[in-house]
Image (tube, rainbow, N blue to C red):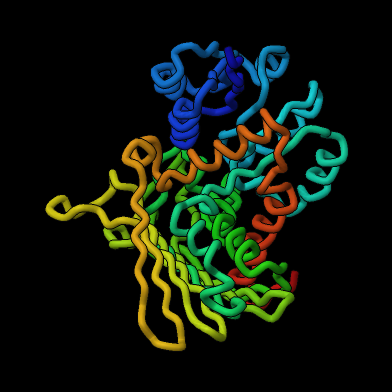
């Protein structure tokens, strides 16, 4: 019989529970131990992983010798602290949720961790594995003849409530363009195949959370903005974010253009937030528009209903875990590295800085 791969979970809030549901869909896997300090989240996690033992501290979990890998799904501002604590124990493969860090001064700590930790570390960038994004990536070169311009638009609902309300404030989240948009900056580097050299941005807080207070403080998290990024190979990318646009048919729209044509990806938001009950939620799709004949080709990419029910990311969390499991079991290479995680945060931080200073920021 195949021995089950045993997971240690660090954090089981909203996203942590999505990880639990998707790990459960993988063959021969087991949630062995969980560290989750919030009692309400403990109860929710216990229903999803009834076989798991709950540890009263991170150290207690890390001292266990029956774990094959670790998954960090805690609030943003503690990711790096927890990685550093993990490094004090025997090394095991780690999947750490984005963003990798939140403070610009933490780069030296990341490099120190990298130097002393000798097991694989995968930074969770689920958007890479959404079916329309994967399909766009596969057809990108043939469709465009070499990408020159990339546009990403996300029109979505506001930030959801989280444990301790950490996502209402820049200090704990890293800011919207780190917390939310590191996914998109990662996609920019992945699709364009180069590193950024300059960021120009405009953004702020127009509407969301201004009527809320937490311990006497009004949230300062931004809810909209535009970003233009120049890359070392001459390509350019733009991001348009609006977080008070719930009800849009597609939550993300990605357009890549080159000398021979254009390819677009359309990604619906979570089905549970679909606001038009009389109409079915749209399927993800890609659209190809070659310059030669001008005839569009539309390819629908429906997602397995089981995967849709397991999370809010069009099955991408499951596909990501499939690949991470291959790292743990077969020693496959990590697909989203510490460098990828660092660049995504740096681009988000440069965006926040550019918008605050109202000037371009060089990277």
Residue at x 36% of width, y 78% of height: 296
Q: Looking at the rendering, which quadrant does residue 62 occupy?
A: top right
Q: Quadrant of the N terminus?
A: top right
Q: Looking at the rendering, which quadrant does residue 308 occupy?
A: top left
Q: Give above or below for 321 relative to 236.
A: above
Residue at x 39% of width, y 44% of height: 312
Work out whether residue 300 can be spotted.
yes
- In this orientation, which residue lies closer to the viewer: 162 or 153? 153
- In this orientation, which residue lies closer to the viewer: 333 or 108? 333
Identify the residue at the far left of this view. Answer: 278
In this rendering, would 191 be left or right of 198?
A: left
In this rendering, would 290 be left or right of 172?
A: left
Q: Quadrant of the C terminus?
A: bottom right
Work out whether residue 242 can be spotted.
no
Residue at x 36% of width, y 64% of height: 299
Identify the residue at the far bottom of this view. Answer: 292
- In this orientation, which residue lies closer to the viewer: 57 or 141? 141
Residue at x 67% of width, y 21% of height: 68
The x and y percentages for residue 46 are: 43, 16
The x and y percentages for residue 307 are: 38, 39
Q: Give above or below for 249 relative to 213.
A: below
The x and y percentages for residue 29 are: 54, 22
In this rendering, would 49 be left or right of 187?
A: left
In this rendering, would 141 be left or right of 312?
A: right
The x and y percentages for residue 254 are: 46, 68
Q: Give above or below for 345 relative to 70.
A: below
């Amino acid at each position: 019989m195949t021995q089950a791969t045993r997971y240690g979970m660090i954090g089981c809030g909203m996203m942590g529970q999505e990880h639990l549901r998707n790990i459960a869909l993988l063959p021969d896997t087991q949630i062995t131990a969980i560290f989750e300090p919030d009692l309400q989240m403990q109860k929710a996690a216990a229903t999803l992983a009834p076989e798991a033992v709950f540890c009263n501290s991170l150290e207690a979990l890390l001292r266990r010798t029956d774990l094959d890998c670790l998954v960090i799904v805690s609030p943003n501002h503690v990711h790096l602290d927890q990685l550093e604590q993990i490094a004090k124990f025997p090394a095991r493969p780690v999947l750490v949720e984005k963003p990798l860090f939140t403070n610009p001064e933490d780069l030296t700590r990341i490099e120190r961790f990298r130097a002393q930790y000798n097991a694989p570390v995968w930074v969770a960038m689920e958007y890479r594995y959404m079916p329309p994004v994967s399909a766009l990536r596969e057809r990108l070169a043939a469709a465009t003849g070499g990408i020159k311009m990339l546009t990403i638009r996300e029109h979505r609902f506001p930030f959801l409530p989280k444990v301790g309300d950490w996502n209402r404030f820049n200090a704990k989240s890293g800011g919207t363009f780190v917390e939310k948009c590191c996914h998109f900056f990662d996609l920019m580097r992945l699709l364009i195949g180069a590193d950024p050299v300059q960021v120009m941005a405009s953004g702020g807080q127009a509407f969301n959370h201004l009527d809320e207070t937490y311990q006497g403080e009004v949230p300062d998290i931004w809810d909209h903005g535009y970003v233009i990024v120049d890359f070392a190979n001459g390509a350019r990318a733009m991001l348009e974010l609006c977080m008070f646009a719930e009800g849009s048919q597609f939550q993300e729209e990605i357009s890549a253009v080159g000398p021979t044509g254009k390819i677009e990806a359309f990604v619906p938001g979570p089905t549970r937030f679909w606001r038009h009950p009389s109409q079915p939620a749209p399927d993800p799709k890609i659209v190809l528009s070659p310059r030669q004949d001008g005839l569009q080709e539309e390819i629908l990419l429906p997602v397995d209903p089981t995967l849709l029910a397991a999370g809010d990311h069009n099955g991408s969390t499951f596909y990501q875990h499939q690949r991470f499991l291959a790292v743990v079991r077969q020693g496959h290479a990590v697909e989203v590295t510490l460098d990828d995680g660092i660049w995504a945060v740096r681009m988000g931080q440069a965006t926040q800085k550019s918008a605050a200073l109202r000037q371009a920021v060089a990277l």
